[in-house]
Image (tube, helix red, strand yellow):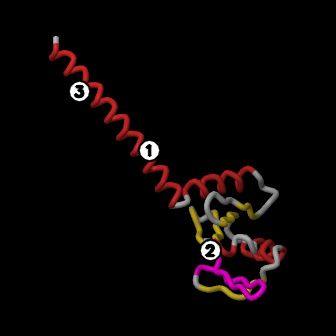
Amino acid sequence: MTNCKICSNSESRKKVFSVFIVAALVVLILKVTYELKYLDLISGILKVETNKKAAIHKVSMKSLFFIGLVGSDAVYTDAMNKMGWNFVSVYGRGMIFEKDGYEILISKRTYFNRYVTYEVTTREIFDLI
């Protein structure tokens, strides 16, 4: 009888350990997805596809992140101008804006040849925008 208790005890430990491993794996996958901005991208694509009235949508879970359809650079520049940021120049795949002596680089990326994202990751700039 003692052996049965030990066997059931070790089986329950194995179950707890396997549940812990699965939970840790799920948390790790969510963390990587969050860091790579896939959740922002997916929610932004849903906003673009469901709300056709606005050409640019602000999507932000951890950084200042905008999304629109390809070819919406002029609309994004106008939106930044309304917030007081003046377009300076294009720098590689980014755009440089200036406001009150601050210059920021907005990174621009294209996904699926249909969506373009604009992102500012500098935390000090969040209050200014």
Q: Amino acid at mark 3?
A: Ser
Q: Earlier in the sequence, mark 2 or mark 1?
A: 1
- Element under disc 2: loop
Q: Quadrant of the C terminus?
A: bottom right
Residue at the spot 65% in from the left edge and 55% down from the top edge: 45
Dot 2 alpha-carbon crowd within 10 angstroms: few under 14, some 14 to 19, many 20 or more: few
User: Could you give the CA–CA distance between mark 1 and mark 3, rounded to whole angstroms?
Assistant: 24 Å
Mark 3 highlights which residue? 10
Residue at the spot 32% in from the left edge and 29% down from the top edge: 15
- Queried whether the magenta region covers residue 95, the answer comes back as yes
Q: Earlier in the sequence, mark 3 or mark 2?
A: 3
Numbered badge on residue 122? 2
Dot 1 alpha-carbon crowd within 10 angstroms: few under 14, some 14 to 19, many 20 or more: few
Residue at the spot 78% in from the left edge and 85% down from the top edge: 100
Instruction: Find the magenta span and give its range.
Output: 93-106
Q: Quadrant of residue 53?
A: bottom right
- Element under disc 1: helix
14 horizontally vs 110: left or right: left
Q: Residue furthest right?
A: 82
Q: How many marks?
A: 3
Name the spot of residue 126 as percent of width and height, x first. 70, 70
In the image, 23 versus 77, the foreground residue is 23
- Queried whether the magenta region covers residue 88, the answer comes back as no
Dot 3 alpha-carbon crowd within 10 angstroms: few under 14, some 14 to 19, many 20 or more: few
Name the spot of residue 127 as percent of width and height, x first. 73, 71
User: Could you give the CA–CA distance between mark 3 and mark 2, rounded to whole angstroms?
Assistant: 50 Å
Q: Quadrant of the N terminus?
A: top left
Residue at the spot 73% in from the left edge and 61% down from the top edge: 57
Name the spot of residue 52 as percent of width and height, x first. 78, 55
Q: Amino acid at mark 2?
A: Thr
Q: Amino acid at mark 1?
A: Val
Numbered badge on residue 26? 1
